[in-house]
Image (spheres, rainbow, N blue to C red):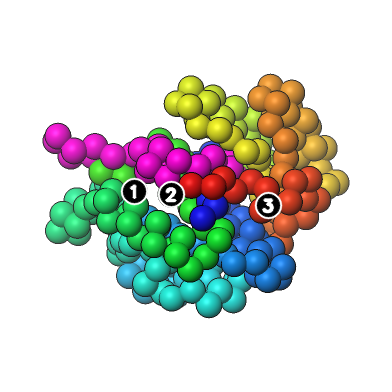
Amino acid sequence: MKSVFVTGTGTDVGKTRVCSAIARYFTKKGLSFAYYKAAASGTLCLPKSDPGLVKAAASLTQRDDTLVSYLYEHPLSPHLAARVEYGRFVDPEVVERAWRALGHDYEYVLTEGAGGIVCPVVYEKGRKLFYLDLLKRFGCGALIVSDAGLGTINHTVLTFQYLKDHGVEVKGVILNRYDHDNLMHKDNEFMIKEITGLDTIAHVRDGSMDLEDITTPPEELFDEV
């Protein structure tokens, strides 16, 4: 199968909305596509969770039980949500098996993280797991979702440098809540490119669930794994 990992510069920058836009792109083209998230928090109701929102936005036919491996009720980082909810910690072996199983039925698998790339998945004595560890298990590159507004230069550059320092190929950036008429948004995009060399793969307007101004066909961002 082919996969790419979607991370963000932080919480609430729009990873799920961008994943929905990517999923909609693939379904409109009729390509064999699946979405996966290791852990989602904030609700035990799948349709109200991030994976459920992506499925609905893109009209995915994928089975619900293949969208996410761990759902937590509390809106917390997975490591803390699991601790609060009776020690139901993420098992990386379970995650990798579920992720790889999608390759039997789909050619493209989009994988979404939670929070930023340093978000802890498990952080217990003698047992520590970060999204970077999962990403390395998957063996694919990463796509950074950034909010187009104030502060994004710093957040995007730091996220890029962290991934690069840990040997992860960064495919590019997708700017969320982008306004073509906003001088700051345009300058942020320019400065990110100047500092990191990263291309902006696409824009997503505020409130939209579609990719705009695509510079690289999304299917070319996926690595064979």
Type of amino acid under label 1: Ser
Magenta stretch holds residue 46? no
* Image quadrant assignment for residue 97: bottom left
Type of amino acid under label 3: Pro
| Circle nearer the viewer, 1 or 2 | 2
Give the alpha-carbon distance from disc 3 to disc 2, as whole Å. Answer: 21 Å
Q: Position of residue 78 (x, y in %)?
A: 31, 50
- Residue where numbered disc 2 is placed: 114
Q: Give the magenta part as a residue range.
A: 123-145
Q: Residue at x 52, y 65 (%)?
A: 106
Tag 1 near tag 2, CB within 8 Å: yes
- Residue where numbered disc 3 is placed: 218
Look at the image and tell me whether residue 113 can be seen.
Answer: yes
Q: Residue at x 56, y 45 (%)?
A: 223
Look at the image and tell me whether residue 4 can be seen.
Answer: no
167 shown above or below 115: above
Q: Position of residue 217 (x, y in %)?
A: 73, 51
Q: Earlier in the sequence, mark 1 or mark 2?
A: 1
- Residue where numbered disc 1 is placed: 77
| Circle nearer the viewer, 3 or 1 | 3
219 shown above or below 26: above
| Observer-nearest of 104 and 212 | 104
- Describe the element under mark 1 as helix, strand or loop: loop
Magenta stretch holds residue 144? yes
- Describe the element under mark 2 as helix, strand or loop: strand
Q: Earlier in the sequence, mark 3 or mark 1?
A: 1
